Amino acid sequence: MEYEKWEPYYQEILKDTGFSQKDDEESTAFIAQAENALPPEKATEILRKAIRGKTAVICGNAPGLRDETEKIRGIVREDGNPEKPDQEKQGKPDQEKQGKPDQEKQGKPDQE
């Protein structure tokens, strides 16, 4: 990706969503630092605490997005339980067995 070509689209996204570029860059740095410095379980725990009670969308629409989402170890749900992508595709069997309502955060990456 060449930022010079992407930047006008990025600025439009910021304008449309009302997000601040400064906050977006700080969030990106926070996630990258946790992801690179910690075991996945610890990084997930820190991220979960940072976004609990907030709306969060962490994704991009890059040509490699589908391949990248294949690497996702799980999805952090609002109720704090990690979920594997294969459970997500199969209709959340653990929730159905336990009778728990679906409390998954809206706005997760679209994997179509």
Image (tube, rainbow, N blue to C red):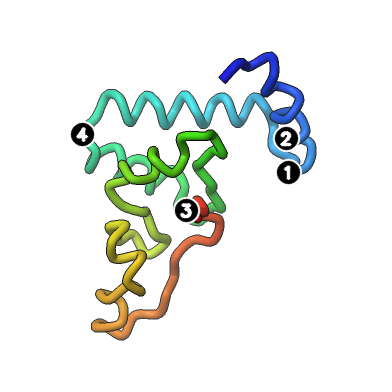
Q: CA distance from mark 1 to mark 3?
A: 21 Å
What is the total number of numbered labels drawn onto the structure image?
Answer: 4
Q: CA distance from mark 4 to mark 3?
A: 25 Å
Answer few, some or many: residues within 10 Å of disc 4's Cα (few below 14, many 20 plus, some between 14 and 19). few
Q: Amino acid at mark 1?
A: Thr
Answer few, some or many: residues within 10 Å of disc 3's Cα (few below 14, many 20 plus, some between 14 and 19). few
Residue shown at 46%/35% (left/top)? 64
Where does the image place residue 20, in percent across and percent down from the top left? 69, 32
Instruction: Identify residue for label 1.
Output: 17
Instruction: Identify residue for label 3.
Output: 111
Question: For the residue labelled by badge 2, is the local secondary structure a helix, a strand or a loop?
Answer: helix
Earlier in the chain: of badge 4 and badge 1, it is 1
Residue 14 sits above or below residue 22 on the image: below
Earlier in the chain: of badge 4 and badge 3, it is 4
Residue shown at 47%/53% (left/top)? 111
Instruction: Identify residue for label 2.
Output: 14
Q: Which mark is residue 39?
A: 4
